[in-house]
Image (tube, rainbow, N blue to C red):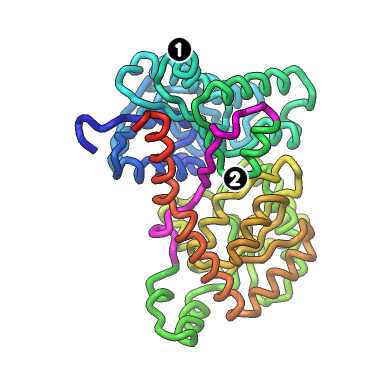
Amino acid sequence: MTDDSPRVVVVSQHYPPDRSGNASRVSDTCSHLAEGDWGVTVVAPPPAFPHGQFDRSWKRETTETVDGVTAHRLWSWQPASEDPGFLARMAYYLLFPLHALCWVLVHRREYDAIVTSSPPIFTGLAGLPFGLLTDTPWIVDVRDLWIDAAVGLGFIDEGGAIERASRWYEGFVLRTADRVTVTTRVLGEDLVDRYGLDEGTVRHLPNGVDTETFRPSDADREATTDADREATTDADREPTIVYAGNVGHAQDLAACVRAMSSVASPDATLRIIGDGDTRDQLERLVAEEGLGDRVEFVGLVPRETIPELLDGAMIGVAPLKRDDTLEYAVPTKAYEYMACELPVVATGVGEIEALIDESGGGLFVDNDADRLATAFDDLLSDAERRDALGASGRTHMVERYDRGVVARELGRVLDEVAGR
């Protein structure tokens, strides 16, 4: 980047040290983008996710620069409990975009483009003045159907005033933006059908993974023969099924816990890394089922330790609930498992099944504890099959889903809307 390079400001509700898939996605994408022609600034609230895991900050603004990206932290309400109530969540989701709106209006002449990352949908408030009143291009990055998920999970009433107002607002934002980027093609098709978007404004920008950070251990990579590789992996890995991510309402971790009572493989353990709204419920389920020796709750860990923890396991599980409102979803963890050559066992519907099929990186099964247990046993007992699935998944990630590839595509979209 030079002094006359174009500059983009990215507004995101989550940014490291927040521990969420989107925090890492925004951070990695911005870092790679900053290596090219664009100067990158991020505007985000103080770290507060998962909720209750961070000390509250009362500073109006703090600034730091990491990997060529300048991040401005703007004060917002920060929920203190692990499962905050409706008012606390809405304060968190609304105060930040209002603060961000004021910030970008003050600094509007410093930037050649703006990107707002959704969900939550309210981040679009910061981009509306650009879309309505200026020639500065505005890109809305949509990662999931937040309203559908909120309705499906019972957070808001279907057909109620909140849902209707939210959908009107979301449609207005998406139709006003110059481009809409989506993480999956199903998501893009849904937005076009639902809100009447021009298909020409929609671009596919998948979640992806940093394949240099998430990769097999050096010992695995340096093994010269299949026999050496199998001996190395079996020596270093435990019979562990790992889940690494948000412990939330969209994940069918309860089925995974119940599956462990039927897993025949000796010493097999389900290791849940992360935290979230449903952890307490899962811990009660483990106690009720008497599975304390087969399910381990690790809690939150520094993100830089995740690749090593994945490398020590034999299977990665990506258990989405089977819900039509999640048809578009592909959890970031699935990409990370594959990048580490970890075979994936996935549940759900839609895009996650398509990823498993096209990558050859794992098994897709029904949301059923017995079927999950069978899949776990099949892979735990067959090292050759695990290695084949893992290698196929890794190749697919490097070629199509590396974060550098994703950032270059975002750069092309920015160049397009900026007329470069």
Vertical order, 28 against 125 (above or below): below
Magenta-drawn segment: 194-215
Magenta-drawn stretch contains 196? yes
Q: Return the mark for residue 184.
A: 2
User: Under tag 2, what secondary structure?
Assistant: loop
Residue 18 at x, y percent in the picture: 47, 39
Dot 2 alpha-carbon crowd within 10 angstroms: few under 14, some 14 to 19, many 20 or more: many
Question: Are circles 1 and 2 on residues that touch, CB within 8 Å?
Answer: no
Which residue is at a point 20% across and 31% down the rendered structure image?
3
> Would you say 33 lies left or right of 191 here?
left
Residue 130 at x, y percent in the picture: 44, 18
Label 1 is placed on what type of residue? Leu
Label 2 is placed on what type of residue? Thr
Please tell me which of labels 1 and 2 falls first in the chain. Answer: 1
Dot 1 alpha-carbon crowd within 10 angstroms: few under 14, some 14 to 19, many 20 or more: few
Which residue is at a point 79% across and 23% down the rendered structure image?
159
Quarter placement of the C terminus: top left
> Would you say 157 lies left or right of 101 here?
right
Residue 125 at x, y percent in the picture: 52, 19
Q: Nearer the viewer, residue 386 or 417?
A: 417
Residue 124 at x, y percent in the picture: 52, 23
Vertical order, 387 against 16 (above or below): below
Please identify the dominant SS of the magenta region: loop
Residue 234 in view in this figure: yes
User: Under tag 1, what secondary structure?
Assistant: helix
Quadrant assignment, res 278? top right
Magenta-drawn stretch contains 248? no
Which residue is at a point 60% across and 26% down the rendered structure image?
89
Q: Nearer the viewer, residue 279 or 395?
A: 395
Q: CA distance from mark 1 to mark 2?
A: 30 Å
Residue pointed to by mark 1: 133
Which residue is at a point 62% across and 28% down the rendered structure image?
197
